[in-house]
Amino acid sequence: MNKTSPFSIWFSTARPKTLPLALASIIVGSALAFRAGQFDLITTLLAFLTTILLQILSNFANDYGDHVKGSDTAERIGPLRAIQQGAISGEQLKKSLFVVGGLAFLSGATLIGYAYQNVQDLLIFSGLGGLAIVAAITYTVGKKPYGYLGLGDISVLIFFGFLAVLGTFYLQTHRLPADILLPAFGCGLFSVAVLNINNLRDIEQDKKAGKNTLIVRIGGENGRRYHLALLSLAVLFYLIFVLFTFQSWANFLFLLTLPLLIKHALFVYRHKDPTELRPLLGQMAGLALITNLLFSVGICL
């Protein structure tokens, strides 16, 4: 396929490398439901579709918001976006927010309509779904986008940890035991770690653009320590969950990635030049996905 075709341009703008990570939280939530003996395939597939659309919406909004505010420049260490190269106009990207946002709404409404059990479920998840769409857009779009205020990390933890994992589990089981909070935390922290690599890499450019991410606020050195803490806590939360709900030694499968996570964490901590972190975004996303998959497989066996 021609690399400059409209499809390839929009496909790259959707940032396909981020999509498997978005699905990981649905996989974890569904694996927990399977473990509880209440797995529902249709709910899982609808949750997959809704999450993918929300992630694409967030990616489009991120590109559009950064473009409007001038945050993405030729100095960018990461790959140039299609809008930076002139392959997509700002107006086209703005229109895409309405299209993808509408599709996310329809998918989410179908999910809730299929899985809800009572009026309380309907009202709560309708509100959460609407909040997810607004949050996906306002990360970098608007007069005071929260991504520019250092609130991106907590947003990722909430939406890729609590809402995705707990919501997927609840819509299949219609209960919410306290121990489910542990894998929800773990999954969310791995997603935050991916964002953290992005923010560590772009720290100098974000400073110039007035994008006060958490890393800009706390500095690169503390940001690297923060990265170690994110990975350590994510593994710890999964480990505590497995120890308290132990069923078989297969539950510890996720620990197979521990040497790779340690190697990654040490590299991040020791290398202070942001340009050296360029290949680590994909690496962190891959490690998070594999760890989540192994955790999910392990608790299902």
Image (cartoon, rainbow, N blue to C red):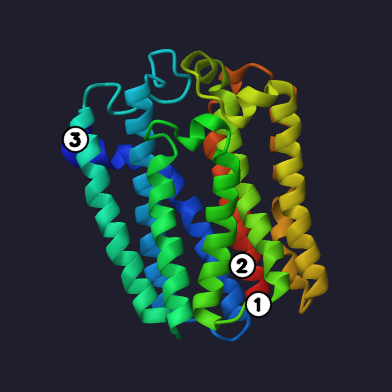
Relative to 45, say whether 225 is above or below.
Answer: above
Residue receiving disc 2:
296
Q: Which quadrant is home to the C terminus? A: bottom right
Asked if the residue at tag 3 contacts the one at tag 2, i.e. Cβ–Cβ closer than 8 Å, the answer is no
Tell me the crowding category of disc 3: few under 14, some 14 to 19, or many 20 or more residues within 10 angstroms, Cα based. Answer: few
Residue 22: percent from left, percent from top: 48, 53
Relative to 76, say whether 176 is above or below.
Answer: below
* Any part of residue 88 in sight: no
- Mark 3 or mark 1, earlier in chain: 3
Residue 128: percent from left, percent from top: 46, 62
Q: Look at label 2 and name its amino acid.
A: Ser
Q: Look at label 1 and name its amino acid.
A: Leu
Residue 150 figure quarter: top right
Residue, x 37% and y 72% (percent of image)? 111
Relative to 287, say whether 124 is above or below.
Answer: below
User: Along the horizontal axis of the image, is 240 left or right of 95?
Assistant: right
- Mark 1 or mark 2, earlier in chain: 2
Residue 13: percent from left, percent from top: 31, 37
Residue receiving disc 3:
92
Q: Nearer the viewer, mark 2 or mark 3?
A: 3
